[in-house]
Amino acid sequence: MDKKCRIMRRKPVAADKFYPADKFALLNQIETMTVSTKHKQQALALIVPHAGYVYSGAVAGKVISLVEITDTVLLLGPNHTGLGKLYSLMCSGIWETPLGNVNINQQLANMIVKGSKIIEEDRKAHIYEHCLEVELPFLQYYNPRLNIVPLVVADTQIKRLKEAAQNIANTLKAFSEQVLLVVSTDFSHYEPQEVAKEKDSAAIQAILNLEPEDLFYKVNTLNISMCGFAPVVMLLYICKELGVKKVELIDYQTSGRVSGDYSSVVGYAGIVIR
């Protein structure tokens, strides 16, 4: 049975909550959270946080500042709402942000859906989900030509995560353009500062070692409340298929830096994979 994609215009749901809804206020905030560099590097993938900009924007902005943002970005993130499929890919339409419209790359989206038995076309998971939306203004800031393929993952079974990752890797190998993968995740949630740092360090080390099974094991055995661990596991499998030269931790912070409350923090890591 052929899988067909439907067209829709997605309105922002995180504006005025996670970031300013006013275009110029948003641009001003982004400018304070990015770094200036003359020589941007090519990257295969980024891991960035998705909390409110006041808390995690400095980490996301720093990472995104350092690399060339390709015209096409494959966005992966966790499903916070419980809506939609286990692997929900919105494969046609437009995402609106205060900085303008972002088109979905329908060609690549259709290729991914058709190349997988478990990744499905679904828009329900995206309507109220914030984790991918909050990355868009940073990406648009550096590439106004941006188009995306948005995929939200609700699965926690490593066998299926590996299968979906291999499906995506095979599709990217067959796709004619360069694609940047951006995974949206926060790390430990509402733990004391030292506990969060210790747990997040274990998860980050597994990522730096490019070991998806180890990350999966540590998240489960150490009870790390990393909301996007599943798409990060997928990313590591994809990167192993596509070839990786370097994995680098750019920054790690917690919400305590802003709130001053170190008794209950959320962890944010920014990682570049080349």
Image (cartoon, rainbow, N blue to C red):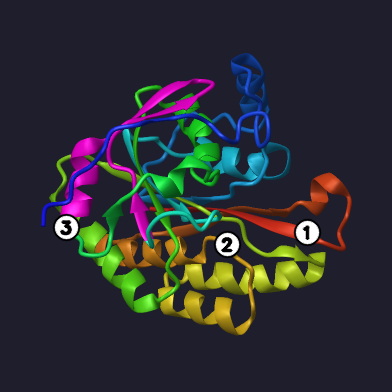
Q: Residue furthest top?
A: 24
Q: Write down the region rendered in magenta.
A: 87-114
Q: CA distance from mark 1 to mark 2?
A: 14 Å
The residue positioned 38% from the left and 53% from the top of the image is 274
Numbered-mark total = 3
The residue positioned 16% from the left and 57% from the top of the image is 115
Residue 127 in the figure: left or right of residue 261: left
Q: Are marks 3 and 1 in contact (CB under 8 Å)?
A: no
The label nearer to you, 1 versus 2, is 2
Element under disc 3: loop
Q: CA distance from mark 3 to mark 2?
A: 26 Å
**Label 3 or label 2, whichever comes before in sequence order:** 3
- Which quarter of the picture shows residue 59? top right
On the question of residue 70 being in view, the answer is yes
- Which quarter of the picture shows residue 169? bottom left
Residue 141 in the figure: left or right of residue 256: left
- Amino acid bearing label 3: Gly
The numbered disc on residue 115 is: 3
Residue at numbered disc 2: 227
**Label 3 or label 1, whichever comes before in sequence order:** 3
Residue at numbered disc 1: 265
Residue 269 in the figure: left or right of residue 207: right
- Amino acid bearing label 1: Val
